[in-house]
Image (cartoon, rainbow, N blue to C red):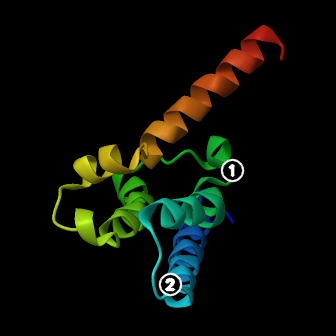
Amino acid sequence: MINKGLTFSNHINQATAKGNRILGVIRRSFDFITPVIFIQLYKSLVHPILEYGHTIWQPRHEAVCCELENVQRRVTKLIASLKEKPYLERLVALNLPSLEYRRHRGDMINMYKYTDGL
């Protein structure tokens, strides 16, 4: 999980590889899938892998954030009707927050829990 430089780059690489692998399985398993079902599968199978333990390894480097966000970019491009739109428009159309936003929100929730003793 942690390399010699005390970073979590190995964990990030494993998470993105596994997320991409599961995304490939989803794509190959269905001939036709509605965007709603596809996003539900993504949220339940890939999202948890990309966000596992983010409070510990919270990425500080832009490259690491981009690596994780690229998995979600690929997911949103797989929906034919949104393929040509910019990433942020695809997120809005699918009602998906960016992974960076979710990490920040999770950190704020955890801070609230710690300060209020929950």
The residue sitting at the right extreme is 118
Q: Residue at x 52, y 70 (%)?
A: 16
Q: Quarter of the image holding residue 83?
A: bottom left
Residue 53 numbered tag: 1
Q: Hey, what amino acid is under mark 2?
A: Gly
Task: Describe residue 50's horizontal placement relative to residue 64 as left or right.
Answer: right
Q: Position of residue 76 (x, y in %)?
A: 35, 63
Q: Position of residue 54 (x, y in %)?
A: 62, 47
Q: Mark 1 Cα within 10 Å, few/some/many (few <14, many 20+)?
A: few
Q: Hey, what amino acid is under mark 1?
A: Gly
What residue does disc 2 label? 24
Q: Position of residue 82 (x, y in %)?
A: 25, 62
105, above or below 21, in the image = above
Task: Describe residue 116's horizontal placement relative to residue 36 as left or right.
Answer: right
Q: Pick whichever, 104 or 92, lies toward us.
A: 92
Q: Quarter of the image holding residue 111?
A: top right
104, above or below 47, in the image = above
Asked if residue 60 shows in the view, the reply is: no
Circle 1 — which element? loop
Question: Label 1 to label 2, Cα distance in Å?
Answer: 23 Å
Q: Pick whichever, 60 or 87, lies toward us.
A: 87
Q: Pick whichever, 24 or 81, lies toward us.
A: 81
Q: Residue at x 50, y 67 (%)?
A: 38
Quadrant for the C terminus in the image: top right
Q: Residue at x 58, y 24 (%)?
A: 108
51, above or below 67, in the image = above
Residue 106 numbered tag: none
Q: Position of residue 53 (x, y in %)?
A: 69, 50
**Sooner in the amino-acid sequence: mark 1 or mark 2:** 2
Task: Describe residue 48's horizontal placement relative to residue 97 as left or right.
Answer: right
